[in-house]
Image: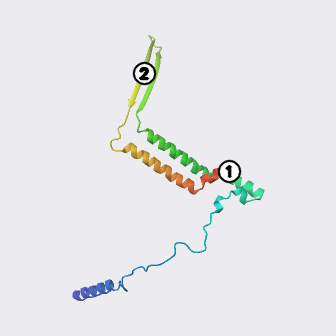
Amino acid sequence: MMKKIYTLAIVLLVLGVSSCKLGKHYSRPELRLPEQIEGTVPDSVSAGDIRWADLYTDPVLRQLIRKTLEGNKDLMIAAAKVKESMELRRIAKADLFPKAEATVSAEREYDETPGNTFEGKVLASWEVDLWGKLRWAGQAALCRASKAGRLCSRLWLPRWRRLISS
């Protein structure tokens, strides 16, 4: 009984593997296509190049579009994220340089014997970027900034500013 099961399993395996190949090896045919379709001229005008004020002439529609663009929260958030990312990159880049810190304090005591205490501290430190932690932090901040920039450009932030000013 066990021999029949093994034989059946081997036959099914051989049939299953051999049934995968249906024809000859496929090779892609070569196509002889022209570089450019004859009689066509590339169009140089795009609807994105036309100012919206020139495209829409209805004054009520213009006012609604302007109000919508001024109050567009998504664009404001995207612009704030780009600005924040660029500032975080500047902070991460500043960690590569030495730091200097100074503090001065004065204290007066009014116990049994009055006394004055003056204290001044100067601290200078610099972290050697031996393993690249600081350098890669700057690269990560740049990546975050570019990701926010891509999001912002996807939402047409540059055009938004130009549209509001028109």
Q: Seen in the image, is 166 located left or right of residue 135?
A: right
Give the residue number, with chain letter if any, for mark 1: 164
Q: Seen in the image, is 49 located left or right of residue 102?
A: right
| Dot label at residue 61 | none
Q: Residue at x 57, y 47 (%)?
A: 80
Q: Residues within 10 Å of mark 1 (few under 14, many from 20)?
A: few
Separation of residues labelled 2 and 1 (CA atoms)? 53 Å
Q: Residues within 10 Å of mark 2 (few under 14, many from 20)?
A: few
Q: Name the secondary structure under disc 2.
A: strand
Closer to us: mark 2 or mark 1? 1
Q: Which amino acid, mark 1?
A: Ile
Q: Which amino acid, mark 2?
A: Gly
| Res. 30 visible in picture | yes
Give the residue number, with chain letter if any, for mark 2: 120
**Pick the front one: 105 or 33:** 33
- Where, by quadrant of the figure, is residue 46 drawn? bottom right
Query: Residue 60: image x %, image y %?
Result: 77, 56
| Colouring mode (rainbow / by chain / secondary structure / one colour) | rainbow
